[in-house]
Amino acid sequence: MEKTKTIIKMNNVRKSFDGKINVIENLSLDINEGEFVTLLGPSGCGKTTILRMIGGFDKPTEGEILLDGSDISMLAPNERPVNTVFQKYALFPHLNVYDNIAFGLKLKQLTKAEIDRKVSEVLELVDLEGFEKRSITTLSGGQQQRIAIARAVVNEPRVLLLDESLSALDYKMRKEMQLELKSMHKRLGITFIFVTHDQEEALTMSDKIVVLADGKVQQVGTPEEIYNEPANVFVADFIGESNIFNGVMTGKMKAAFAGTEFNCVDDYETGKKIEAVIRPEDVTVVKPGEGQLNGEVTSTDFKGTFYITFVQCGQYEMEVHCLENYRPGETVGLHVLPDNIHIIPYDTSINNFEGMIDGFVDGKGLFIVFRDFSMFVDAHRLYPDSSVSRGRLIGQDGEHIDYQGKKVMASFQPEDGDMSDDAKKGDIVGNIVSFYYIGDHYSYTIRTDNEIDYVVDDEDLWNYGDKVSVILPKKKMKYRLLEEQKQEVAD
Amino acid sequence: MKNFHLDRRQLSVPYLIYLVLFVVMPLLVVLYYGFTDDDGNISFTNFIVFFTNSKTMGTLVYSLAIAVIVTVICLLLAYPVAYILAKGKYARKHSFLMIFVLPMWINFTLRITALKEILTMLEGNLAYHPFLNTVICMVYDFLPFMIMPLFNALTKLDSSIIEAGYDLGATFPQVLKSIILPLTVPGIISGITMVFLPAMTNYVVLDMVYNSTYIMGSLIGSYFSSYDWNNGSIISAILLMFIGFFAIFTERILNRGEKEEQRI
């Protein structure tokens, strides 16, 4: 294999529109020369913004974008060796096919003969020989798509950007164009950066997939890596179907989840909280008692080449893709090979909230103000040795504790939080921005207007976008004082 | 029993009566007076006189000059405004557009009177610059009529088509020349139609700024007020022809533009 060279390098790029919420947060990304890279994520994840920043249509608020080692982040689109295939093609309706494709070449002041040659070459590439004189408006969607690609690649860009370029085509045409784009990529050897929300499209076409959510990179890898080794629950849930369970490591390469213990191939310290991901096609249905789990078939759904079978194992539900048709009510055993269990360490950064102490009231405790809420906390939780003297908080040696303005970190476990649709019941109010089914319950991420996420487990099914309030488990919440920068140490 | 039922032909009767009474008849009357002499005999004298009389030809040229200048200035002022309003990244573009259109809600004579006062303050005496004042007042009056169709045309223009131009290496002047302008021709044409024709005939503005030169509108008015119906009519008829030709011409261009839009 030839040596890979980085063609585009994004360093700590941040983008916000009108100084508001960050669409892209501190993004760093390397794209190698000649690769077919797909930016994959749900709508609103910032993938198109990244593409537009590489194309020059949006400028990063912070950070730099390097092309071949030189900073292009502030260059205008017409000064970059990069061309774009727009989502709705954006062909010039007043020009014919030839003039559309020749647009960029004419600006480079090539001779007529050269332009003619290049146009007919590129029309051959996209399989539309002899279309030069056709009016754009007489072309079908698929043909317009090809002309849009031809118009971009004829300029021999260093990087070709494709913005959801296949989404306007019907299913069959899209499948066809996926394969054609891939073969075009091979023939041209240009770096392709493709944006899509369609995970299947990404898996089919890409050399490398960048999974994005909330303006942050979730995982970068080959389609196989992304599918087989998802870096977190979001990726596991977004790419393909998955069964996700909360669990804990019980020994060397042993994990307990879904009510039983499994051997696995990932090694984490015993006692660590984990999430286990099992793909439906990796579960084998066996005779009851012969697998790790036993359960009852609840429903089956024929999908042409396989059956989607749901099996209820106690309180946990498992989705299985199998070739045989099992009747609902049938008792079966389920077996999963250790290799097919993917263990993801539990994300401990969630549900941590920074607040500040703002006063003390005898009998109620320390008053702590967080971004979304404020509460009284028993002073002993933060100052274990403290006591109250004449309504003031004193330490072990009777000195006054200087609590005012001190930073506090509070955290809670998702299973301890509660949700309600009554805004008055909860401590904070937000909208559900994502949720996953984890074996026997759902894990919801609720985002407040301050852009702070709360992760709460709940057994009921709520919907994406629902406005809910979260009841914080005040008794079970953990609090700790944040270390201050020790200025005294310096002198 | 057969239900009482109006078909299309019966329904069109009131409109037909209206058309005959208020459009066809007056037109025929104008044509009749235009091509007869004082005694009611058919004659082309009025027609020939119009094109040979230096006074009427002078008026035609003066009217055309005012109309062309006003239209060009309106277009040059309105295009950038419409472009910024339509393509700028402002959250409240329609409110900004409203500011430009708002004066139309105020009575026309009141607006011109106000502008007259401002001009008098600046120039001392309006009589010094009759032509300039006429142009200023007309531009002020007709500008919204130019902005609106341009704003609509530019709003409809897909921004990604403009971005595609930059993407392929064009600079702003190149994008403007080879993409934005050609694709907003229908808007430009309807803007011109909205401004050019009124500018050629609106003599109220001239009256108000004490511009004693005649334009087509005032010429027609003066003939009719002196009971010379024949000459007044022929000028009306000639003006109608001008407008007719212009309308046919713009119709063609607009149709072509619409066909292209439909096919996209």
Image (tube, coloured by chain):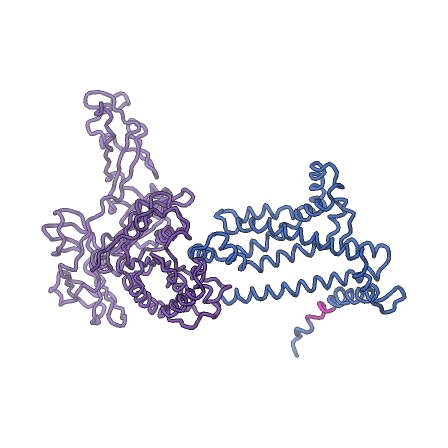
Q: Is residue B14 magenta?
A: yes
Residue farthest along the bottom direction in this orientation: B1
Where is residue B6? Give x, y as percent: 67, 73
Q: In the figure, is residue A378 to the left or right of B165?
A: left
Residue farthest along the left direction in this orientation: A252
Looking at the picture, tell me which residue is in the foreground, B52 or B205. Answer: B52
Q: How many marks?
A: 0
Residue at the (14%, 53%) spot, across then down: A266
Q: Is residue A62 magenta?
A: no
In which quadrant of the rendered view does residue A34 lie?
bottom left
Name above or below for residue B181 compared with residue A124: above
Looking at the picture, tell me which residue is in the foreground, B85 or A146. Answer: A146
Where is residue B237? Give x, y as percent: 77, 63
Q: Main secondary structure of the magenta part?
A: helix
In which quadrant of the rendered view does residue A192 lie?
bottom left
- Identify by letter the chain in blue: B
Residue farthest along the right direction in this orientation: B39
Q: Quadrant of the C terminus of chain A?
A: top left
Where is residue A312? Give x, y as percent: 21, 61
Looking at the picture, tell me which residue is in the foreground, A177 or B21. Answer: A177
Name above or below for residue B139 compared with residue B18: above
* Residue A156 appears in view: yes
Residue at the (88%, 67%) spot, across then down: B40
Task: Magenta stretch: give its range.
Answer: B11-16
Where is residue A281? Give x, y as percent: 21, 64
* Residue A446 appears in view: no
- Identify by letter the chain in purple: A
Q: In the figure, is residue A188 to the left or right of B39?
A: left
Q: Quadrant of the N terminus of chain A?
A: bottom left
